[in-house]
């Protein structure tokens, strides 16, 4: 009988703490997506960054013609550092949203970052980096 009470209490405590539901994907909300992207770049997890933030259809198209390892190496060498700096600049800033609310554009005043903007696009409920 005591074991049943303990199990019941543990189950109740788990539900109260929110353990019953799976963790939300940080890409569901734009601010947490930016934080997550920045953290992956800071941790030099370039492959994971590309897998999570490249638009899936674009990544698939690129990987049809290029090896993932080569893509990751080129990204790490040429794009990761400037992108990390640009993401730092847009943290906490409000984007210009499309009417549908699925495209968020941030102006990037950074001379070492070629595009003048960072664009995120929401696809199937998750934010991806468009550029």
Image: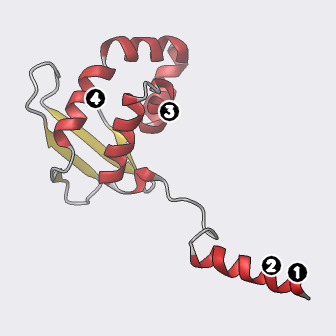
Residue 40 on image: x %, y %: 42, 34
Residue 92 on image: x %, y %: 19, 50
Mark 2 surroundings: few (<14), some (14-19) or many (≥20) residues within 10 A: few
Badge 3 marks a residue whose secondary structure is helix
Quarter assignment of residue 76: top left
Residue under pointer 2:
7
Q: Earlier in the sequence, mark 3 or mark 4?
A: 3
Instruction: Identify which residue is drawn at 26% across, 59% down.
Output: 101
Q: Are marks 2 and 4 in contact (CB under 8 Å)?
A: no
Residue under pointer 3:
51
Instruction: Identify which residue is drawn at 18% across, 44% down.
Output: 105
In this rendering, would 55 be left or right of 114? right
Q: Is residue 62 above or below residue 122?
A: above
Label 3 to label 1: alpha-carbon separation: 45 Å
Residue furthest front as drawn = 2
Q: Earlier in the sequence, mark 2 or mark 3?
A: 2
């Amino acid at each position: 009988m005591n074991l049943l009470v303990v199990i019941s209490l543990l189950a109740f405590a788990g539900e109260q703490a929110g353990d019953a539901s799976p963790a939300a994907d940080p890409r569901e909300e734009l601010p947490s997506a930016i934080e997550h992207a920045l953290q992956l770049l800071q941790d030099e997890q370039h492959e994971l960054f590309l897998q999570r933030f490249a638009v899936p259809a674009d990544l698939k198209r690129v990987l049809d013609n290029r090896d993932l390892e080569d893509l990751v190496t080129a990204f790490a060498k040429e794009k990761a550092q400037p992108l990390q700096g640009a993401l730092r600049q847009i943290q906490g800033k409000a984007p210009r949203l499309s009417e549908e609310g699925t495209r968020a554009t941030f102006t990037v005043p950074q001379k070492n970052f070629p595009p003048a903007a960072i664009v995120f696009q929401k696809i199937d409920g998750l934010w991806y980096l468009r550029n």
